[in-house]
Amino acid sequence: MTESKISLTHLLGLEGVSAADIQVLIDTGFTFREVLDRPIKKVPTLTGINVVNLFFENSTRTRISFELAEKRLSAEVTNFSAASSSLSKGEGLKDTIRNLHAMKMDAVVMRHPVSGAAQQLSSYVDAVVINAGDGTHEHPTQALLDIMSLQERFGRVAGLKIGIIGDVAHSRVALSNIFGLQTLGAEVSVCGPGHLLPPHLSDLGVSIIPDVDDLLSWADAINVLRIQRERMGVGLIPSVREYRNGYGITNERLARHKGELVVLHPGPINRGVEIDSDVADGDQAIILDQVLNGVAVRMSILYHLLSAKGAA
Ligand code: CP
């Protein structure tokens, strides 16, 4: 393993991160993928380093993936769950973090419901901060694993046409994908109910393709966003049946378009809503490749950020 070549101190988002840094993180991700294929899937890279996983919001994939990545690198891992913490006694984020900081952690992985929380955290601590999803802002590690999976499938990212389908307005996955994909030279278009496509998309260089069949004809790959059922109660999403008819990815719909279209989904999946089971489990989907690449690219992120800090 060579010395880290990235210029980042934290990973708070992909906005403004250079193509060179993204490419180094992904390339090292492929190196760690080889480690994950070995009988003993562990390297001593982060021995003596402690990492705290702070999850103030539910998570399955990201939380487990980070914990596995940390353990595969031989780090000491501490998990913090908001539900069982003193937050329930009224303690705020700043005091929670300052107390944890006093315990001298080297890195903090945080998911939080408030946009900008990771940035705020980075001003409270001198540990490496990794954003595991902050509100509707960014989810940079998800985007990096998505981009790594596209590179694995196509051998390149530059020049690819990527469609993002669903509630883009509330999706941190969408925003991080837009930043990362465009930085590496991919073209991004979105499709979804008009009121769920934010007005500033054109400022980001993203085009809107209103009809999902037109998007499928245009794209090399589609990233199907989870329909956030919790938003149905506030009237942002039509009925499940209506949404599926308008935007659901079904085999019937895919069959009308070129066969090589690749399907990604960040999870958790609502089968029969934004994507049908036979698509999610079919040959065109790379959803489980995304999950495996997630562990590898998170190993890469931890390795590079902690090396840059001189901790690894
Ligand atoms: N993709 C993703 O962030 O999933 P989790 O919410 O389960 O972590």
Image (tube, rainbow, N blue to C red):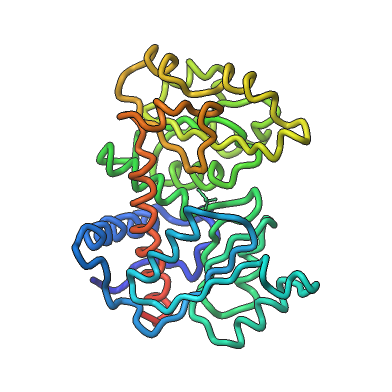
Where on the picture, by quarter, is residue 26? bottom left
Q: Is residue 196 left or right of residue 186?
A: right
Percent coordinates x, y for residue 180 in the rendering: 45, 47
44 is higher (above) or lower (below) than 135: below
Q: Is residue 2 left or right of residue 277?
A: left
Instruction: Point out the residue furthest to the left here.
Output: 39
Which residue is at 49% across, 28% downward? 275
- Examine the rendering and report whether any part of residue 101 can be seen: yes
Q: Is residue 211 left or right of residue 234?
A: left
Q: Is residue 97 left or right of residue 226?
A: right
Percent coordinates x, y for residue 129 in the rendering: 53, 70
Percent coordinates x, y for residue 301 in the rendering: 40, 64
* Count of marks, rendered view: 0
Which residue is at 41% across, 45% downward? 146
256 is higher (above) or lower (below) than 87: above
Q: 106 or 157, which is in the foreground?
A: 106
Task: Name the quarter where the N terminus is drawn.
Answer: bottom left
271 is higher (above) or lower (below) than 88: above
Task: Name the quarter where the C terminus is drawn.
Answer: bottom left
Which residue is at 63% across, 38% downward? 228
Instruction: Point out the residue furthest to the front here.
Output: 84
- Examine the rendering and report whether any part of residue 217 can be seen: no
Percent coordinates x, y for residue 184 in the rendering: 39, 45
Where on the picture, by quarter, is residue 57? bottom right
Which residue is at 48% across, 43% downward? 266
